Amino acid sequence: MPITQDNINFFLNAPAALVQLELLELSHSAFSKTYRIVSNASEGVEFQAHAYTYYPCQVKPAFDFDNLEFKLDVQLGDLGEIIPKELQNIQISETQHEPVNVNYFILRSDNLITPMQSFLNLEAAVFTFTAEGSSFTAQAHGLNTYQTGETYNLKDYPYLKGFL
């Protein structure tokens, strides 16, 4: 998370009643609706003209926020009510190749307009199911995953010597 004066004031000087809200948005073209979830506000919140409903869930960042390989591990306490049905909708539809889109926002409870941090267009890749609910890992679309097969060496590319 970038260090700003607003973040310093929140973490060091904020009153105890002020909390950090975690919002998740799950969407797919085959879903019956876009799921907007807040994990730690039982009355729900409104953000960007959308109502986020409380759902028991746990969101754990798998890496530092400033890493390109950022991942979220999400455990939903949906007892198999939401995710399995929506994944069946995906299998029935023609959009099986399309990943589930996940947006993650971190907000202050006193400022529901500007997020302190946001991660947009993460892809939920692997879903697992237990008696308690569903879990998945959301990560950014693979960056720099393709290899050209070329090796860069000083013999073939002498101008690279200046970068060493």
Image: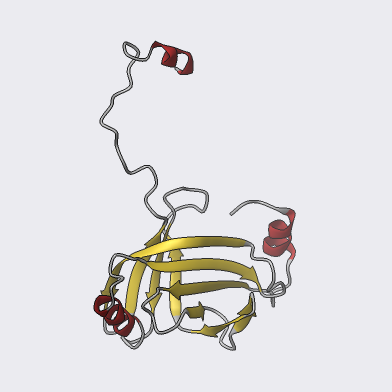
**Above or below, comparing residue 11 to residue 76 in the picture:** above
The residue shown at (45%, 69%) is 59
Percent of width and height locating residue 127: 29, 71
Residue at 29 percent of width and 37 percent of height: 147
Q: How many marks?
A: 0
User: What residue is shown at x 27% (from left), y 81% (from top)?
Assistant: 88
Looking at the rendering, in which quadrant would you find the N terminus? bottom right
Quarter of image, res 57:
bottom left
Left or right of 11? Residue 129 is left
Quadrant (top left, top right, bottom left, bottom right) of the C terminus: top left
Q: Residue at x 69, y 71 (%)?
A: 113
Residue 84: horizontal and vertical position, in percent? Answer: 29, 82
Decide which of 141, 9 is in the foreground and name it.
141
Residue 102 placement (x, y as % from top left): 45, 68
Quadrant for residue 80, please give it. bottom left
What's the colour scheme? secondary structure
Answer left or right for 123 relative to 48.
left
Question: Where, by quadrant of the figure, is residue 100 drawn?
Answer: bottom left
Percent x, y of residue 133: 33, 82
